[in-house]
Amino acid sequence: MASQAPGGSLRDDHTRDQPVAAYTTQDHATWRHLFERQGELLRGRACEEFLDGLHGLGIAAGGIPDFERLSDVLEAATRWRIVAVDGLVPDLIFFRHLANRRFPVTWWIRRPEQLDYLQEPDVFHDIYGHVPLLMNPVFADYMQAYGEGGLKAADLGALTYLARLYWYTVEFGLIRRPEGLRIYGSGILSSKGESIYCLESPLPNRLPFDLLRVMQTDYRIDDFQSTYFVIEDFQQLFEATRPDFTPYYQELRGRPKLKPDAILPGERIVERTLGAS
């Protein structure tokens, strides 16, 4: 975390004012290094919607952005705002934020020795990886729908299925483009190694997006993914969240959990396409 403890109190919804004064010279240098490195890697790899959002928000290499300024731009575009948090927040609070078009952003940044791997989200992961796509109206609506669905899933004891959906779309999703596969998942967009691996390695499975298949599939938190699910466009993702998930949860409880690297009979592997152009 940043070298100084944040000032101000933590609110009931786990948010606080962004502790701008807590950022050190090293913190801003870390941001610049990560921003510049990912900018080079993501050429020809990231989807156009992400790059457009990054540009539209005015996120730059200079240093850790001001959350209020970003929120004002974001709100004007899609009615979303970002809120500063200390890290992961309880599920229900997270879902309430999303349902009300607020995205929780961890305020602190990783240490220099953590540049290539961080187990928990930091400000670079959250701002660089997540926030640009909230400038896209369809994806922004998907995220609100996900939050609303999460609140209902909690009441139905089905959070495991929603966690898998979030993991394989918002965090580690790929999208098909005429020129090849592109990245839209924030866990990939903010990662040096996985930005290359997900598109160029012959090892992982790349499968067409199928809602029930995704929610049936376990995932890895300690290594690159064994499977990536590929959407055709963001409208497909949004349409998948429209129906009432209650019957889906009932069906899923009768299905076995699938291992992260599982391939079912008859499944079609999406052709690997090099991302860099």
Image (cartoon, grey):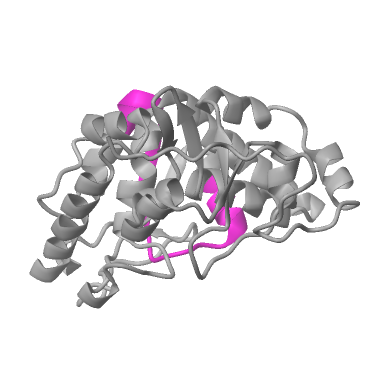
Residue 41 versus residue 72 in the image, above or below: below
Quarter occupied by residue 250: top right
Q: Which residues are magenta?
A: 74-97
The residue shown at (81%, 50%) is 156
Question: How far across and down, in percent of the image, does residue 234 sit?
Answer: 51, 27
Res. 16 in view = no
Residue 128 versus residue 145 in the image, above or below: below
Question: How far across and down, in percent of the image, does residue 154 sit?
Answer: 72, 53
The residue shown at (13%, 61%) is 28
Left or right position of 29 against 15:
left
The N terminus - image quarter: bottom left
Residue 169 versus residue 37 in the image, above or below: above
- Foreground residue, 230 or 124? 230
Question: How far across and down, in percent of the image, does residue 237 sit?
Answer: 59, 31
Question: How far across and down, in percent of the image, does residue 120 sit?
Answer: 43, 67
Residue 82 painted magenta: yes
Residue 121 painted magenta: no
The residue shown at (23%, 72%) is 2
The C terminus - image quarter: top left
Res. 210 in view = yes
The residue shown at (30%, 60%) is 107
- Foreground residue, 232 or 90? 232
Quarter occupied by residue 240: top right
- Foreground residue, 186 or 231? 231
Please tell me how many numbered marks the rendered image carries. 0
Q: Residue pushed farthest right?
A: 254
